[in-house]
Amino acid sequence: MAYQRALEKAWDALAEVRSKDSIFHIGLLSDNYTIDIDNRTVLSDSCNVSAKEYTAIILLHYLTARLKLKKLPPQTGMWIDFKELEGGEGYYPAFKKRTVTQILRKYGSNPGSIKDVLQRMPGETADKGDAGVVIHPFKEISILVTLSKADEEFDADANILFDKNISDIFCTEDIVVLTEMVVHAI
């Protein structure tokens, strides 16, 4: 219920830009979802249950951007840090705690094991840090996760970067939620 107002606003925003189609199929991470605008439902295709509210909101915001822009901006190949997003500098400590710290907790002692997530997530390895992966939560969006192992001078470290096109698709708050979804999935 905590997301109910945001979910209603997302449905209303989608209704303003909707096309003649009322059913959409969208892949998010390792699942596919069916969005039915007329019935205001978002169902996971893998288990035929309603998507969690925060997942539904991300999917609706994504679909709204896709319909509004007609075509989502292509990936640029330029990576940006969370701090470069609007309001990112001030929110970075909370973002780091909710995402980067979680990655370090799980993979910091064995950075190479992060590559195993590619068996169940859309993405590829990245030649960055000691180990890196690019995850595609949506096919037009790339999130780069890099890890560096500890040595005599430095503790293990992790970083999360985004293809620059993400800020043309999502607001910073949505990027935080999407990144948390990726972190929890990997």
Image: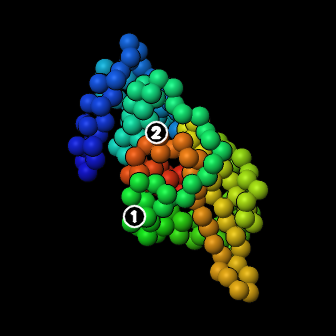
Location of the C terminus (image quadrant): bottom right
Q: Residue 91 carries which label?
A: 1
In terms of secondary structure, where does tag 2 sit? loop
The residue that appears at 51% across and 44% down in the rendered structure is 166
Q: Residue 35 carries which label?
A: none
Q: Residue at x 39, y 30 (%)?
A: 64
Q: In this view, does 105 lie above or below 74?
A: below
Left or right of 69? Residue 9 is left
Q: Position of residue 22 (x, y in %)?
A: 38, 18
Q: In this view, does 59 lie to the left or right of 161?
A: left
Query: Which residue position holds label 2?
Result: 169
Residue 152 location, quadrant = bottom right
Q: What residue type is labelled 1?
A: Tyr
Of pointers 2 and 1, the one earlier in the residue sequence: 1
Q: Is residue 161 left or right of residue 89?
A: right
Packing grade of label 2 (10 A; few <14, some 14-19, many >=20) is many
Q: Write the residue at 52% across / 31% down.
A: 72
Spot occupied by residue 71 in the image (x, y as percentages of width and height): 51, 26
Residue 133 image point, x, y percent: 68, 53
Neighbour class for label 1 at 10 Å: few (<14), some, many (≥20)? some
Percent position of residue 100, x then y:
54, 65
